[in-house]
Amino acid sequence: MPSRVSLALCVLALLAVPVASGSVASASSAVESVTGTAGTHGDHVTVDPQAVSDGSVVVETVSTAGPRFLVLRTDDGGEPGDPVGHASVPAGEFRTNVPVSVDADIWEGWTGNRTLWAVLHRDGGDGTFDPDDDQSVATREPGAEVAFELGRTESGADRVLARVEGRQRLRDGRLTVRRVDLSRAGHVVARPVDGDRVVGSEALSAGTHENVTIALNESFLDDQRRTFRVRLVAYRDDGDGTFGAGDRPATVGDDPIASSLVVEQPESGGNETATTARAPTTGSQTAPGAGTDTSSPSSTSANGPGFGAAAALLAGVVAIATLVARRRG
């Protein structure tokens, strides 16, 4: 009798092992899935010419494959030079409108227009930027750094922020510019990327404007393929409030203050309301470190698949052992 009971105990124990290990494997797979999606976009940054009064640069788009520092650096003969400002960026997100301030002591003596670089650097893990330890990732990801022109205004700012992840679908022949900042009254003007033709414009007062819609010329749309690119340029108004020949582009040095956008026409010309671009994370809305997985990769859940079955089998082992002990007693 004892030998049969011992055999039953062994069988139940062997059955319990793979079920319990199955629950651990499921938890490990879930962790791999989370970490596997973190680097979908890789490391990439875009920023266009802008002029500001307070030293705050707005980087148009940022995507990261890991925890990063977004670093402003001087220009050193066409290469990134000394750091002059930085901000922390979480891993694995496509973000828009990420603010990074030029260091106060640098901005205090800033005059005219200068070339800066926006560069993504690794975060060594302590959350503090060290230019010697936190190296640039642009050595393997060329899109992780970009040069741009930065000017200084007496007040306000001049910038156009339009880029999205993917493309934006037109609605009733209109596109939407995410944000336009103007230090003086003016216009945001749509042009083809390969020409000077004006295909749409919107008059704006001085200040910050979000979700600015621009109607594109029907004749222009008729000549385009379903997907095409447009350039959005900031203009100064000549005083009459209407866009015309007397209005001139706002510039930083020789570079116009502008952005670009890939747009898509609806298949049937209907009233499309959706965009094909996934909603990004806005830089000013998420604190540094948000959106990252802080759980331990080795942790498992007591509610995971297989845990209940394993518990039942182990309970059976305990019950049989108790029965054997009673009979022997």
Image: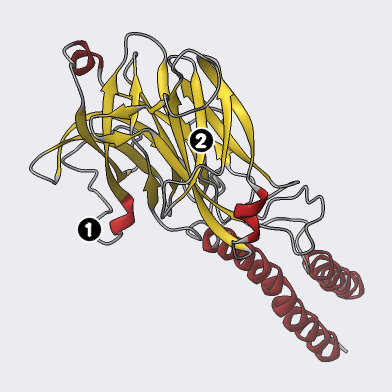
Quick one: which residue is furthest to the left in this view? Answer: 77
Dot 1 and dot 2 residues touching (CB under 8 Å): no
Q: Counting residues from the N terminus, which is met first, the one under dot 1 or under dot 2?
A: 1
Label 1 crowding class (10 Å Cα cut-off): few <14, some 14-19, many 20+? few
User: Residue at the location (20% across, 43% down)?
Assistant: 133
From what the image shows, is residue 44 above or below residue 247? below
Quarter the N terminus occupies: bottom right
Determine whether the residue tagged by mark 2 lies in a helix, strand or loop. Answer: strand
| CA–CA distance in space, label 1 to label 2 | 36 Å
**Residue at mark 1:** 139
Determine whether the residue tagged by mark 1 lies in a helix, strand or loop. Answer: loop
Q: Position of residue 44 (x, y in %)?
A: 39, 52
Label 2 crowding class (10 Å Cα cut-off): few <14, some 14-19, many 20+? many
Q: Give the camera-side residue of 243 and 107.
A: 243
Badge nearest the viewer, 1 or 2: 2
Q: Is residue 192 visible?
A: yes
Q: Which mark is residue 178?
A: none
Q: Position of residue 324 (x, y in %)?
A: 87, 75
Q: Give the camera-side residue of 247 and 310.
A: 247
**Residue at mark 2:** 189
User: Residue at the location (19% across, 16% down)?
Assistant: 110
